[in-house]
Amino acid sequence: MPGQRKRRRQRLDASRRAAAHTAAGTGRWDVVFETQDEREWRARLPELLAGDEPIDPAMARIDTLCGRPARPTTYRLSVFVPDPAVGGPPTDPAR
């Protein structure tokens, strides 16, 4: 398929940039939403990603903490908050 190598390289580069921006010591992960109800999770996730203050998917993390009989499964959405002293990810002038 034409252009597949280029698209794959762009995705890989983007994931490397995101990993560098969220490296240890450059900020923290803040929990935005957490629930143990899967239906509530599936209903609220699109609202949170496209809400009044949309969340940048590159700076978001979705965790599913697997449940056991003693602890139910937990669904968590976190966003990366850069440390101002270290400097956050560069802003895109095109946006």
Image (cartoon, rainbow, N blue to C red):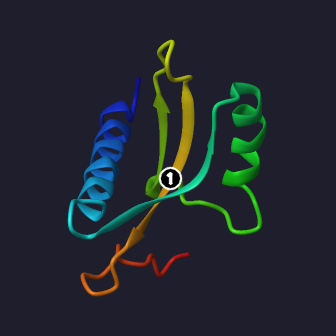
* Residue name at image x 49 percent, y 30 percent: 64
Q: In the image, is 22 to the left or to the right of 79?
A: left
Q: Is residue 84 above or below residue 36?
A: below
Q: In the image, is 66 to the left or to the right of 6?
A: right
Q: Which corner quadrant of the image does residue 80 belong to?
A: bottom left
Q: Is residue 15 above or below residue 71?
A: below
Q: Is residue 91 above or below residue 5?
A: below
* Residue name at image x 72 percent, y 32 percent: 42
> Which residue is tagged 1?
78
Q: Which corner quadrant of the image does residue 27 belong to?
A: bottom left
* Residue name at image x 55 percent, y 24 percent: 73
* Residue name at image x 69 percent, y 35 percent: 41
User: Residue 76 location in percent, x, y?
Assistant: 54, 42
Q: Which corner quadrant of the image does residue 9 belong to?
A: top left
User: Residue 65 location in percent, x, y?
Assistant: 46, 30
User: Which of these two is toward me, 73 or 29?
Assistant: 73
User: Residue 72 location in percent, x, y?
Assistant: 56, 22
Q: Residues within 10 Å of mark 1 (few under 14, many from 20)?
A: some
Quadrant into which the C terminus falls: bottom right
Question: Disc 1 marks which amino acid?
Answer: Ser
Q: Residue furthest bottom?
A: 85
